[in-house]
Image: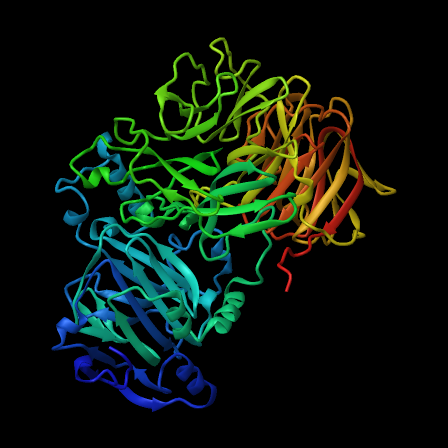
C-alpha cells in the first residue's frame, strides 16, 4: 500500500468509511515537505471517519516472518489524546490496534523522563509476536516452581505495571510521549522490525526500541486507518491529516528511513528539538535518547586508554517483558577529561538473547578477549531446563566491535544460577590467566583456549560483578561497591580475606568495576536508582584512595568535576535558634537544641564548597539543599561524628536518631569530628558530595525539590561553616 489517494492501484483496495476526504492538496511548505518525503503533496482529511485498506487483497497484506517495516505520516490537528491511527480489522482481537495515541502509561515511561513530558498523552505502537506455544514449551510454569521462576518474574512485572497478559500474548509496546515529540505538528512515524530488534523512529529520530522473542505474529489485512477497536466496538475518533501509509515485508535501511523522514538535516534538527543539545560524555552522563540509562559498568585499561563498557538500558530494566534486554554501550578516554562515545560493541542479534551480562576482559595475542554471562532464556523455550545461565566469549581486534561465540564456554549445569559473573585476571605467580566464576568454580589457562579447574584458590565467600586487583602490598576483591582485602594473592592457598565492612566504597554507586590508568585506580558504575525505576542510572566515575592501613576510600575524579561559573554573593538569614554570620563564615550554636541558618537565592544546579569545623562533642550537623521556607523542605546531608556516620535524609523537625534512614548512608567516615572540607554538586535530581577527598556519597532528589535556600544546621553542639563558595554549574554541551 502506498499513498492515500489510491496510488497503489487496485491491490490497495482503499475504501472510504464516513467523513474522510481523499486527495486534498497541501499548500506551500506542507506540500514541499510531503514531496521531500516521497509523498505527492496530497493528503486524506479525517473528521471522524476512517479508511478500510486491503479488503479483498489479503495476500498483498499478509505479513509474517522476522522482518517488517511500517511508515505512517500524520498530523493530529485536534490534539485528541486517545485516537486510533492504524489497526487490523479484527474486532474480536484485543490486540488488533497497532498505532494509536493514548493516555500516557506512567509505568512504561520510566524515571526520570516523566518530568520531561509536557502533557499526559503518548504515541504508542503495539507489537505482537508469535503465540506462546511457539515461543515457549507447551507447559507453562509460574513462580511456585523455582526451576522456571523466570516466568514468575514476567508475571510479577506485568502485574506491577498494569499490563497483565503482555508476555503471554507476545505484546511489546514502543512509546513516544507527545510532549516529547511535539503536539499539533506533522510526524513521520517509522517502525522497523529486524529479527531481534523492534525500533520506533519519529521524524527520523530513534525514540524507542525493544527486543521481541519470536517472529511476527501473522498480520493479515484488511487494515483500518483512523480507526480501531475497543472491547469489540469500532472507534473512529481520529481527526487530522494523513499523508501516506506504507508497509513492507522487509527491514528498511537507515538511508531509506532518513529519506522517508525528510533527510539527515531534518532528523538532526528534530533530534535537538526532542532531546536537547547533545551532552559531552562525562560525570553523570546518560546515553542520548528516551528512557535510556547506564547499567552495569566494566572498566578495562589498555595501551593508555581507559575503556568503560556498560549495559545499555531502556526502560530501566523493563524491556523484553522485564527480562532486561541489554546490549552494550562503550565510552573511552586517554586523560579522564576528554571522552569518546563509540558505537554498540556487543549487540543483541538473536531473538532468544536477553541481557548480555556483566563481563571481564583480557588482552592476549593482539586481541581483546571478553568473558561475559548470558542468561540463556532459551531454557524455558526448550525441553532442557538445565541449560541456564552460561559463560560466553567474544573477541575484538580493537576493542570497538566484538564478535560473539554462540557456543558457551562454561555451562554451570543447573538453571538460573544467578550471577555467575566471570572475572578474568593474570596469574602473576604461575603465568597465564585465572577465570573465577563467582566462586562456582575457578579455572586456569595458559592460552585462553584450554581450560582446567584450578584448585586451592581461596576467594571471598560472596561476590558478583567483581574486580580483582593489587595495590601496593594489598590485594582486593571488589564486588558491587563492597570489597575484601588480603596481603596474599588469590593464587596463594594461605590467602585470608577480610571484609572491609566499616569503610566500603559503596557510596551510592551501583555495580562499579575498576582498573588503573597512569597509576590511578578508577572505578566506573552508575548512579543510584529510585525504587520506582528498578535498574540503571547515569555514568558515575570515582577515583579510589588507599589509606595507610590498606582500607579504600573514594574521591571525585578532578578532571570530571562539572564546570562551574563565577562565585555568587548570597544573603544570609537566621532561620531558627542561635545562628549568625561573621565575615564569610556561618556560626551556629545549639548546645541543647537545634539551630539553623540559610543562604538565599541559590541556583538549582550548583557547586558548593566549604570548610566544616565542628566543636568537640557535637552530636550532629550538616547542610540541606533545595530548601524552602523556614526549613519546610530540603535534602539534608547529615554528619554524626560519634558514630562516624554520614547520610542523606529528608528535612524533618524530629531530627536524626541513632537509626539510619532509608536514604543513602556511609559508615566508617573518619575524622568528621575535626575540621574537614566538603564539596557538593547539585545537578538535576542528583546530589553528590566529596568529604575531605577521602569519601564520597551520592543520592537522588526523590521528592523533586526545587527550593532555592541552602540551610546549615547543628543539633546538640556547635559548628562553624567557613570559606563557603557557591557557583552555578555550566551546561556540559558539545561544541558546535
* Tally of numbered discs: 0
Q: Is residue 519 above or below residue 396?
A: above
Front one among 169 and 384: 384
Q: Is residue 155 above or below residue 290?
A: above
Residue at the (19%, 47%) spot, across then down: 135
- The quarter in which the N terminus is drawn is bottom left
- The quarter in which the C terminus is drawn is bottom right
Q: Is residue 456 above or below residue 512?
A: above
Snapshot colouring: rainbow
- To which quarter of the image does residue 735 belong? bottom right
Residue at the (26%, 71%) spot, across then down: 247
Residue 145 at what x, y percent from top left?
A: 21, 31
Residue 472 visible, this angle: yes
Q: Is residue 172 left or right of residue 204?
A: left
Residue 357 at what x, y percent from top left?
A: 39, 38
Check the image and name the residue furthest to the front.
365
Check the image and name the residue furthest to the top.
494
Residue 650 visible, this angle: no
Residue 297 at what x, y percent from top left?
A: 49, 39
- To which quarter of the image does residue 634 belong? top right
Q: Is residue 116 left or right of residue 195?
A: right
Q: Is residue 183 left or right of residue 96?
A: right
Residue 561 at what x, y percent from top left?
A: 67, 45
Q: Is residue 242 left or right of residue 603?
A: left
Amino acid at each position: 500500500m502506498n499513498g492515500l489517494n489510491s496510488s497503489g492501484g487496485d491491490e490497495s483496495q482503499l475504501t472510504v468509511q464516513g467523513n474522510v476526504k481523499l486527495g486534498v492538496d497541501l499548500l506551500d511548505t506542507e506540500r514541499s515537505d510531503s514531496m521531500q518525503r516521497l509523498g505527492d503533496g496530497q493528503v486524506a482529511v479525517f473528521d471522524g471517519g476512517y479508511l478500510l485498506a486491503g479488503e479483498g487483497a489479503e495476500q498483498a497484506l499478509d505479513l509474517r516472518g522476522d522482518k517488517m517495516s511500517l511508515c505512517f505520516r500524520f498530523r493530529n490537528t485536534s490534539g485528541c489524546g486517545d485516537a486510533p491511527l492504524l489497526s487490523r480489522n479484527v474486532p474480536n482481537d484485543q490486540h488488533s490496534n497497532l498505532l494509536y495515541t493514548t493516555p500516557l502509561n506512567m509505568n512504561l515511561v520510566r524515571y526520570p523522563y516523566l518530568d520531561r513530558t509536557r502533557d499526559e498523552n503518548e504515541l504508542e505502537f503495539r507489537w505482537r509476536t508469535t503465540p506462546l506455544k511457539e515461543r515457549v514449551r507447551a507447559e507453562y510454569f509460574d513462580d511456585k516452581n523455582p526451576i522456571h521462576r523466570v516466568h514468575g518474574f514476567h508475571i510479577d512485572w506485568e502485574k506491577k505495571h498494569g499490563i497483565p497478559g503482555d508476555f503471554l500474548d507476545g505484546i511489546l509496546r514502543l512509546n513516544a510521549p507527545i510532549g516529547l515529540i511535539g503536539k499539533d505538528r506533522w510526524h513521520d512515524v517509522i517502525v522497523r522490525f529486524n529479527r531481534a530488534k523492534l525500533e520506533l523512529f519519529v521524524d527520523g529520530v530513534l525514540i524507542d526500541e525493544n527486543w521481541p522473542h519470536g517472529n511476527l505474529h501473522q498480520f493479515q489485512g484488511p487494515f483500518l486507518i483512523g480507526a480501531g477497536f475497543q472491547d469489540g466496538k469500532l472507534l473512529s475518533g481520529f481527526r487530522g491529516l494523513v499523508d501516506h501509509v506504507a508497509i513492507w515485508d522487509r527491514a528498511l535501511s537507515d538511508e531509506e528511513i532518513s529519506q522517508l523522514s525528510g533527510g539527515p538535516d531534518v532528523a538532526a534538527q528534530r533530534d535537538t528539538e526532542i532531546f536537547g543539545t547533545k551532552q559531552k560524555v562525562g560525570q553523570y552522563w546518560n546515553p542520548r535518547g528516551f528512557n535510556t540509562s547506564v547499567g552495569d559498568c566494566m572498566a578495562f585499561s589498555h595501551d593508555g586508554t581507559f575503556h568503560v563498557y556498560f549495559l545499555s538500558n531502556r526502560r530501566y530494566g523493563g524491556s523484553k517483558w522485564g527480562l532486561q534486554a541489554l546490549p552494550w554501550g562503550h565510552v573511552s578516554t586517554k586523560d579522564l577529561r576528554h571522552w569518546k562515545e563509540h558505537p554498540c560493541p556487543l549487540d543483541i542479534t538473536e531473538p532468544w538473547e536477553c541481557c548480555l551480562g556483566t563481563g571481564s576482559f583480557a588482552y592476549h595475542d593482539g586481541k581483546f578477549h571478553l568473558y561475559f554471562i548470558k542468561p540463556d532464556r532459551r531454557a524455558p523455550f526448550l525441553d532442557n531446563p538445565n541449560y541456564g545461565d552460561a559463560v560466553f566469549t567474544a573477541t575484538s581486534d580493537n576493542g570497538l566491535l566484538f564478535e560473539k561465540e554462540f557456543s558457551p564456554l562454561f555451562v554451570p549445569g543447573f538453571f538460573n544460577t544467578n550471577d555467575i559473573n566471570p572475572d578474568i585476571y593474570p596469574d602473576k605467580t604461575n603465568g597465564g590467566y585465572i577465570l573465577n566464576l563467582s566462586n562456582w568454580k575457578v579455572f586456569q589457562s595458559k592460552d585462553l583456549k584450554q581450560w582446567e579447574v584450578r584448585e586451592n584458590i581461596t576467594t571471598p565467600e560472596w561476590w558478583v560483578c567483581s574486580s580483582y586487583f593489587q595495590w601496593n602490598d594489598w590485594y582486593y576483591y571488589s564486588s558491587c561497591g563492597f570489597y575484601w582485602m588480603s596481603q596474599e594473592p588469590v593464587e596463594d592457598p594461605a590467602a585470608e580475606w577480610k571484609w572491609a565492612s566499616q569503610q566500603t566504597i559503596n557510596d551510592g554507586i551501583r555495580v562499579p568495576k575498576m582498573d588503573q590508568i597512569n597509576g590511578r585506580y578508577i572505578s566506573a558504575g552508575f548512579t543510584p536508582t529510585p525504587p520506582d525505576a528498578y535498574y540503571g542510572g547515569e555514568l558515575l566515575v570515582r577515583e579510589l584512595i588507599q589509606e595507610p592501613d590498606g582500607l579504600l576510600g573514594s574521591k571525585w575524579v578532578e578532571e570530571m568535576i562539572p564546570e562551574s561559573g563565577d562565585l555568587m554573593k548570597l544573603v544570609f538569614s537566621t532561620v531558627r535558634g542561635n545562628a549568625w554570620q561573621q565575615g564569610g563564615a556561618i556560626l551556629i550554636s545549639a548546645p541543647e537544641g537545634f539551630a539553623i541558618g540559610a543562604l538565599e537565592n541559590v541556583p538549582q544546579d550548583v557547586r558548593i564548597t566549604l570548610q566544616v569545623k565542628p566543636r568537640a562533642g557535637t552530636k550532629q550537623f550538616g547542610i540541606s539543599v533545595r530548601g524552602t521556607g523556614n526549613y519546610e523542605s530540603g535534602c539534608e546531608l547529615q554528619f554524626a561524628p560519634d558514630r562516624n556516620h554520614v547520610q542523606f535524609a529528608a528535612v524533618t523537625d524530629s531530627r536524626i536518631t541513632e537509626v539510619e534512614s532509608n536514604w543513602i548512608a556511609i559508615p566508617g567516615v573518619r575524622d568528621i569530628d575535626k575540621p574537614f572540607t566538603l564539596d557538593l554538586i547539585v545537578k538535576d535530581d542528583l546530589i553528590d558530595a566529596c568529604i575531605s577527598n577521602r569519601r564520597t556519597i551520592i543520592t537522588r532528589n526523590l521528592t523533586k525539590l526545587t527550593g532555592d535556600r541552602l540551610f546549615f544546621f547543628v543539633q546538640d553542639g556547635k559548628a562553624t561553616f567557613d570559606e563557603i563558595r557557591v557557583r552555578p554549574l555550566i551546561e556540559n554541551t558539545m561544541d558546535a
